């Protein structure tokens, strides 16, 4: 079977490295490719949220509380006029005194691609006021996903929140990875008593009920700490429990590779222990590690979201998806402003995309196992 | 079903209707790069009481053919076209292709009318049920026997496949059985419903030769008693010669030749068949290359002297007080069955394992003698340059992440012998030396066939210009036609580099072809050492006699394993 496949394949197959084989296998996985594209877009947004935001995410606007989402129109009554939106004005219902927004079609405002808006720092360095698109009239802000109770633009806040929520996943997983690879590697490569000790620690950590531990630790954080310090502490709390799974994966790979004949061959070739680990063994399971990481990130994102939603994670004015969802905690918002759930949609999208990507990577990581 | 009525005699053979007639069977496997035609227009007939051997090398489609009959082809494979007419005991016929792969009818046929035994009994038997439970389940399912009746019948079946103390064995678990016993239990299960046709897919490949002989014997006896037809799939021409009535030779999904076993062996009409038989009969005598050589002078001091070597794994003594010597330029074969400790012994010599006691004295080219058992640090590193190893598995022993040039160059690089352009040149030279195109240097192992991969392993072993090479089952994973090519390569390199080999193998044919002297290992002990011809033709030790006589000879006129010696260890 393998022989026939090899012979039938294109000539480039023979000089294809394993990463190329993985990429070919991955590319066939349609859902995983879709996941990859979504994840790529999300992380571009997370890298420069200001560019994708429309209004200043922190700016309150007393004239626009609970403003409903506005649609982009291309045609007006006079025919095609390009992308524009219809602003509305806050009025009081004369009978019930309830706030209502009345559209004002005669005041249609154009949307400008790469237009000017509020000023922000690109990558935290370059001061600019360019945005992907902006309202041509600074007095008439555009709210594609509506506003919250303080009149802040939900779309822009989701963009800003992406930075915190997605990066907390990455940083948290990076921390778990460092602990996991070191402890798992030692455990798997040396075996014996060290392995026994580390595995018992891993079992202990896995036996801890994570949510109460997170709650307790997060609740112990002083509320008056600066946002960045709080952010760091939350990632550390999350990765404290996340490393155990990765340590297991790494140990398993080491154990199975240690008995591979090519590792024995490397030892007989005269390779040092370091060279055996880094040159011969590590490349063989990098792909598996990457797949495990990709599957660990969504767990981190969800953990941060739940903590912040419960008010124990990040605190306002820091913007994360979990913090945004706190706005949607009460019944009133379900009734009057369902668009406040939009950050939840962002969480679902990110977690789904990362899971699909991770599944695809895991399937593709073993190009010979088909 | 009466036993005597089913028993065929020679004259009935020609008149009998075939049990199964396969016509133009086509089975395809869709893969990334297109379609693999695993079975491509295969036709054959199987008669009651007869054995049809389907023989071919790996990838020839022989197993897929067998699986197609029972409609158990692994996904994504599927039967595209053809007919498989099966004749039931009552004379009615059914086309198995039309039954599809699920549904009541095909399930009735599986196990009931056609039974199958597989290569690896451990994975075909459930590890969590006793042997008895598994047989009883089949009996109750297909024959509707009561619990007690099924149990009694199961004990009968176990007795029939010659499992000792069947009334106790019935309550044992799979893992309590040895490989041969598992295969017997598997056969007992397949016989449960007295099938008309038994399909055996390489049932003895995972077994030792002596166990193989027992199982072949058993199948033959049972076939005579029940008169069932047998389709026996194998790659081993010796087994074919031993048991077949008719032979079907397959290559790349097609039938190359089919006919009577005598015709196939003595008057093959197809080139492929001829090559296949030739590559097996070649291994019946020593290599021409070796015959043309002057004998190794006996007075030269040995390059390797193993003295009283022992290796313990906890309570098990895997290697027990083994002593032998290897002279420069000589090949010493080590033959033995699985568990005899031959691999452990080889791994001790290259110090992948640390022996418990004993000495391995290695004589350097300058005359200095060092003990490999106690060598450590720089001495061990030096020794590993001169005593190298060739591994069994041509897939697992090459790092899939490195190119061929990197794999072959690794020992030169890490020992600081060559780097940069010099390394490139030496690697190219080594590749030529083992018969690989230097232009393939940037390819990854997955682009090579098994034989080519083993050549890469050989190049890596000789890269450091060693004096001794331990080859552990170096040709066992290869097809017969490739096997002697690699053996010839080893002989050529021996002449060029003056190498001494310790060649570990379970295959007497390979040993006879390659080795000057041979040592026979049994349960950790070296029971006999001597000149190959003498050991193979006139063995001294009773175990060696049993071993040699159990090897099927690839000639249907010399069937003899039922007359073999049996070795019972004296306690």
Image: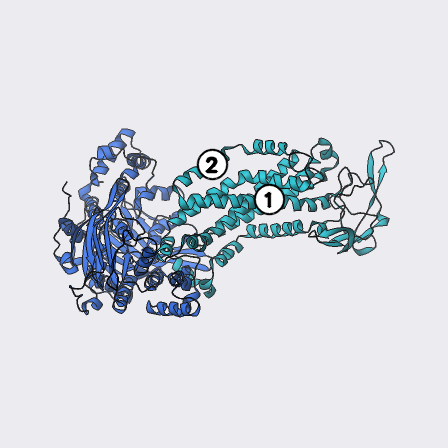
Chain colours: A cyan, B blue
The residue closer to the viewer here, A304 or B61, is A304
Label 2 secondary element: helix
| Residue A8, above or below A55 | below
Residue closer to the observer: B395 or A317:
A317
First in sequence, mark 2 or 1: give its number: 1
Judging by the rendered image, the residue that carries numbered circle 2 is A201
Task: Answer with the quarter of the image where residue B42 lies.
Answer: bottom left
Q: Closer to the camera, B87 or B486?
A: B486
Q: Position of residue A344 (x, y in %)?
A: 66, 40
Disc 1 element: helix
Cα–Cα gap, marks 2 and 1: 24 Å
Left or right of residue B552, residue A260 in this image:
right
Front residue of this view, candidates A214 and B446? A214
Pinpoint residue A214: horizontal percent, then vertical percent: 58, 34
The lab-note entry on whether marks 2 and 1 share a chain reads yes
Q: Chain of mark 2?
A: A
Residues at discs 2 and 1 in contact (Cβ within 8 Å): no
Name the mark on residue B99.
Answer: none
* Image side of residue A53 versus residue B486, left or right: right
In which quadrant is the N terminus of chain B drawn?
top left
Protein chain holding label 1:
A
- Give x and y (percent) for residue A153: 75, 44
Residue A150 figure quarter: top right
Residue B353, x across and y down, in percent = 30, 49
Q: Is residue B270 visible?
A: no
Q: A337 above or below B381?
A: above
**Mark number displayed over residue A169:** 1
Please identify, in this view, whether the residue under mark 2 or under mark 1 is nearer the observer: 2
């Amino acid at each position: 079977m393998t022989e026939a496949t090899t012979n039938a394949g294109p000539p480039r197959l023979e000089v294809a490295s394993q990463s190329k084989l993985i990429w070919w296998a991955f590319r066939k996985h349609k859902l995983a490719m879709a996941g990859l594209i979504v994840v790529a877009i999300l992380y571009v947004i997370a890298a420069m949220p200001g560019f994708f935001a429309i209004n200043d995410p922190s700016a309150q606007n007393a004239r626009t509380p609970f403003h409903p989402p506005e649609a982009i129109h291309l045609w007006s009554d006079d025919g095609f006029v390009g992308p524009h939106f219809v602003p509305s004005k806050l009025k009081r219902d004369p009978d019930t005194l309830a706030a209502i927004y009345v559209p004002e079609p005669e005041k249609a405002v154009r949307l400008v691609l790469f237009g000017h808006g509020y000023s922000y720092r690109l990558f935290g360095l370059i001061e600019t006021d360019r945005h992907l698109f902006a309202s041509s009239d600074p007095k008439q802000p555009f709210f594609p996903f509506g506003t919250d109770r303080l009149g802040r633009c939900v779309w822009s806040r989701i963009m800003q929140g992406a930075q915190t929520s997605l990066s907390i996943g990455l940083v948290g997983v990076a921390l778990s990875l460092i602990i996991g690879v070191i402890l798992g590697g030692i455990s798997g490569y040396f075996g014996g008593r060290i392995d026994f000790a580390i595995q018992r620690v891993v079992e202990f950590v896995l036996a801890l009920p994570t949510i109460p531990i997170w709650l307790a630790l997060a609740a112990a954080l002083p509320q008056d700490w600066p946002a960045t310090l709080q952010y760091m502490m939350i990632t550390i709390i999350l990765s404290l429990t996340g490393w155990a799974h990765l340590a297991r994966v790494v140990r398993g790979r080491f154990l199975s590779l240690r008995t591979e004949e090519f590792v024995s061959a490397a030892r007989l070739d005269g390779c040092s222990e370091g060279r055996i680990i880094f040159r011969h063994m590590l490349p063989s399971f990098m792909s598996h590690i990457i797949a495990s990481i990709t599957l660990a990130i969504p767990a981190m994102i969800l953990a941060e979201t739940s903590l912040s939603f419960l008010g124990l994670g990040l605190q306002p004015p820091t913007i994360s998806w979990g913090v945004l969802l706190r706005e949607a905690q009460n019944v009133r918002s379900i009734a009057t402003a369902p668009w406040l759930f939009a950050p939840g949609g962002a969480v679902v999208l990110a977690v789904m995309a990362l899971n699909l990507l991770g599944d695809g990577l895991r399937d593709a990581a073993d190009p010979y196992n088909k | 079903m009466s036993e005597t009525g089913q028993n065929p005699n020679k004259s009935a053979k020609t008149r009998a209707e075939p049990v199964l007639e396969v016509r133009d069977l086509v089975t395809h496997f869709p893969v990334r790069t297109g379609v693999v035609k695993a079975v491509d227009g295969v036709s054959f007939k199987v008669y009651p009481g007869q054995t049809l051997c389907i023989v071919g090398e790996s990838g020839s489609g022989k197993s897929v053919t067998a699986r197609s009959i029972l409609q158990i082809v692994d996904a994504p494979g599927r039967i595209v076209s053809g007919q498989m007419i099966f004749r039931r005991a009552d004379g009615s016929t059914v086309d198995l292709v039309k039954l599809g792969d699920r549904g009541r009818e095909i399930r009735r046929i599986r196990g009931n009318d056609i039974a199958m035994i597989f290569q690896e009994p451990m994975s075909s038997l459930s590890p969590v049920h006793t042997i008895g439970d598994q047989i009883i389940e089949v009996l109750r399912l297909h024959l509707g026997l009561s619990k007690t009746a099924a149990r009694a019948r199961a004990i009968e079946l176990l007795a029939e496949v010659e499992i000792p103390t069947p009334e106790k064995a019935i309550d044992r678990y799979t893992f309590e059985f040895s490989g041969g016993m598992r295969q017997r239990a598997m056969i007992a299960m397949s016989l449960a419903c007295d099938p008309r046709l038994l399909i055996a897919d390489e049932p003895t490949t995972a077994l030792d030769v002596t166990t193989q002989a027992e199982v072949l014997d058993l199948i033959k006896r049972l076939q005579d008693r029940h008169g069932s037809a047998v389709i026996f799939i194998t790659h081993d021409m010796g087994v074919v010669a031993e048991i077949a009535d008719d032979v079907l030779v397959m290559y790349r999904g097609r039938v190359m030749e089919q006919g009577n076993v005598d015709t196939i062996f003595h008057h093959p009409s197809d080139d492929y068949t001829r090559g296949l038989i030739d590559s097996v009969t070649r291994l019946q005598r020593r290599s021409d290359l070796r015959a043309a050589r002057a004998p190794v002078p006996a007075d030269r001091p040995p390059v390797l002297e193993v003295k009283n070597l022992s290796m313990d794994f906890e309570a098990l003594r895997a290697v027990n007080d083994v002593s032998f010597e290897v002279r420069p330029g000589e090949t010493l074969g080590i033959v033995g069955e699985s568990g005899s400790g031959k691999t452990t012994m080889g791994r001790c010599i290259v110090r992948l394992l640390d022996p418990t006691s004993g000495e391995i004295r290695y004589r350097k080219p300058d005359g200095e003698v060092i003990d490999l058992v106690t060598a450590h640090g720089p001495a061990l590193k030096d020794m590993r340059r001169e005593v190298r190893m060739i591994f069994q598995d041509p897939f697992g022993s090459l790092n899939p992440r490195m190119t061929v040039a990197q794999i072959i160059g690794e020992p030169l690089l890490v020992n600081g012998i060559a780097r940069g352009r010099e390394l490139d040149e030496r690697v190219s030279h080594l590749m030529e030396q083992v018969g690989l195109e230097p232009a393939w240097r940037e390819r990854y192992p997955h682009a090579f066939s098994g034989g080519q991969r083993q050549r890469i392993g050989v190049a890596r072993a000789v890269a450091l210009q060693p004096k001794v090479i331990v080859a552990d089952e170096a040709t066992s994973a290869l097809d017969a036609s490739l096997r002697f090519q690699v053996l010839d390569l080893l002989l050529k390199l021996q002449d060029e580099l003056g190498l001494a080999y310790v060649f570990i193998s379970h295959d007497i044919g390979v040993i006879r072809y390659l080795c000057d002297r041979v040592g026979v290992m049994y349960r950790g002990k070296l029971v006999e050492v001597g000149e190959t011809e003498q050991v193979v033709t006139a063995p001294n030790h009773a175990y060696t006699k049993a071993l040699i006589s159990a090897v099927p000879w690839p000639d249907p006129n010399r069937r003899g394993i039922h007359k073999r010696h049996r070795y019972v260890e004296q306690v």
